[in-house]
Amino acid sequence: MKRDTRSAYRARAAATERSIDEAKDAVKAEQAAEQAKRAAEHAERTKPVPFTREELHTARAVRTDYGWHRVIRVNTTTITVNGDFGDYRVPEKNILEVRS
């Protein structure tokens, strides 16, 4: 009687697929942990510094998510800053830090 080699081949292929899937899951978990670590470091570096309205009125520069900008004028709800391509308004809620 002849042995059916197709089922042995399928069993080896299934075992190989399982080991590949396990390796992929391990790599994905490692990448997710690294991404979470980088996100926490970024959040720590870019966290907002508390400031008062008086400090904002005397500020010469403000920091947003895009970097530091020179203050031109402080309005009631926005701050007009000098940007790379002209002047634009930044809402006060988007200001992370002020410098006088």
Image: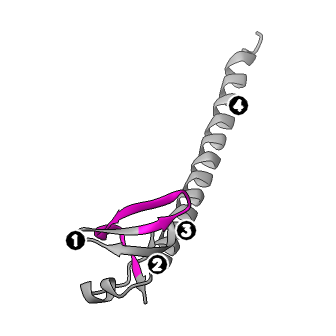
> Label 4 belongs to which residue?
12
Q: In the picture, which quadrant includes the N terminus?
A: top right
Would residue 65 be seen by someone viewing this image from the given angle?
A: no
| Circle 3: residue type | Arg
**Residue density around tag 3, few if under 14, some if 14–19, many if 20 or more, within 10 Å:** few
The numbered mark, 1 or 2, whose residue comes first in the sequence reads 2
Q: Which mark is residue 44?
A: 2
The spot of residue 42 in percent (x, y) is 51, 71
The spot of residue 47 in percent (x, y) is 41, 77
Q: Secondary structure at mark 4?
A: helix
Would residue 54 be seen by someone viewing this image from the given angle?
A: yes
Does residue 76 appear left or right of residue 98 in this picture?
left
Mark 4–mark 3 Cα distance, whole angstroms, equals: 39 Å
**Residue density around tag 4, few if under 14, some if 14–19, many if 20 or more, within 10 Å:** few
Vertical comparison of 53 with 93: above or below: below
- Between 15 and 69, the residue placed more toward the observer is 69
* 1 vs 3, front mark: 1
Q: Which residues are magenta?
A: 81-97
| Circle 2: residue type | Glu
**Residue farthest to the left, as pictured:** 76
